[in-house]
Amino acid sequence: MQDAEYGKLERKGPGKRAAGVPQGRMANLELLRCVAMMMVVVLHYLGKGGLLPELTGTDMDSTGLVAWLLECFCIVAVNVYMFLSGYLLCTSSFKPSRLVGLWFQVWVYSVAVGLLGALTGIVMETPVDTHYILTLLFPVSMSHYWFLTAYVFLYLLLPFMGIALRKMDRRQMQVAACCLLFAFCLLKSLLPARLEADQKGLDCLWYLCVFVAAAYMRRFGVSFLEKRGRGVFLYIGSCLAVFGGTFGLREIYLRTGSLELILKVFLEYNHILVFLAAAGLFAAFSRMQVSGWLSRLVNHIGPYTLGVYLLHENLGLRYTWQNWLGAERITSVWGLAAGVAIAVTCVFVCGVLVDMLRVLVLKGMDECLGKLRVYQGWKGWLRKADSWFAGDGNLV
């Protein structure tokens, strides 16, 4: 969800090669990271808070329509994170220390918050059994956080695909990207049927597709998105098309009783419209100039946004916090707007603060353990392993 390795970052938007620009965080992309995480919170508040009426029902009111409209405008969040990862990591070296650090961060949240939820009795709709404990102890392998499972597997492929993508020329990358998008995105978007191999964008293969697309934008750019405003237009237009397509399928279903299996196909991460909406939003932010206090703020909190996800999506809290924040009491459009605003603010701020606390605690533990020879040897081995891959992150 976040990338510690920024490498040489250009500041002129997508498609411009790195050319000795000083290292540092890009405030516009850090702002996008924060916005995308807020969108994730909205999705989980609406979906797990019971605020999205069933599309198969006939009693859709204005509050339900607005809730689905918000869903359509926020569904791009996960793809946006992968665009950020592909754009930033395609020029970076693989680091075993980064992989270990990410895994440990996920493990700490999984065990600490999960056990706290079980011991305090706040776990809802999830039985505290052997499967629950195994999920806490092995969060990546047990898909405690499905996105992090896909992300970790994708990062494991970085030594191979990173070098390959940096050596490809424009035509090679175009063919590779088109083949991937056709197989995992376009085909399922056009056919009025459910494909058995389609994982709805919930797997590593789909994020490999988005990673390749982002790497192409980084190296060669997309001429259509170079002009200011086109990214915003693509995002808004695609999201409205997702909404229109979803309710168009609903209307067909209500009239004929058919197409039930693909009622939500427009809302799946690997649908072409969701992909285009994410590309448009990413392009819009990549051309944005962020400075002053906002730049300092987002650069400071950006590294902690992963904690927001790891906290509120933990099994110990996943189906509980929505009702704490009043989801079950919402009955009007204005109540929905207020509820979403409160939920996003509370969850985002709490998640960032908790992750800041985690960093402080682990920093203190690192200083204490640093006196142990075994720990020093482990960190020395990680630094050595990082050096084995150093130098493979330069564009050719």
Image (cartoon, grey):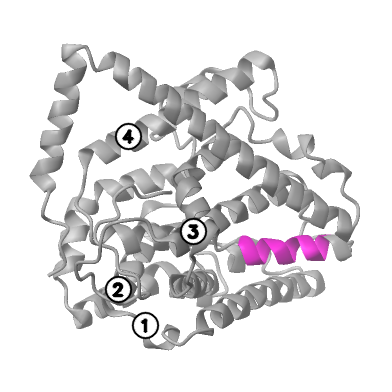
Q: CA distance from mark 2 to mark 3?
A: 26 Å
Q: Which residue is mark 1?
A: 222
* Circles 4, 1 touching at the beta carbon (< 8 Å): no
Tell me the distance, in whole angstroms, between the alpha carbons under discs 4 and 1: 34 Å
Q: Earlier in the sequence, mark 2 or mark 1?
A: 2
Labels 2 & 1 near each other (Cβ < 8 A): yes
Residue 216: mark: 2
Tell me which amino acid carries mark 3.
Answer: Ser
What amino acid type should be assigned to the residue bearing mark 1? Val
Report the side of 263 relative to 193 (left or right): right
Majority secondary structure in the magenta region: helix
Q: Quick one: 287 or 291, which is closer to the camera?
A: 291
Give me the C-alpha separation between circle 3 and circle 1.
26 Å
**Which element type, helix, strand or loop, lies under badge 1?**
loop
Q: Which residue is mark 3?
A: 295
Residue at image position (67%, 15%) is 120
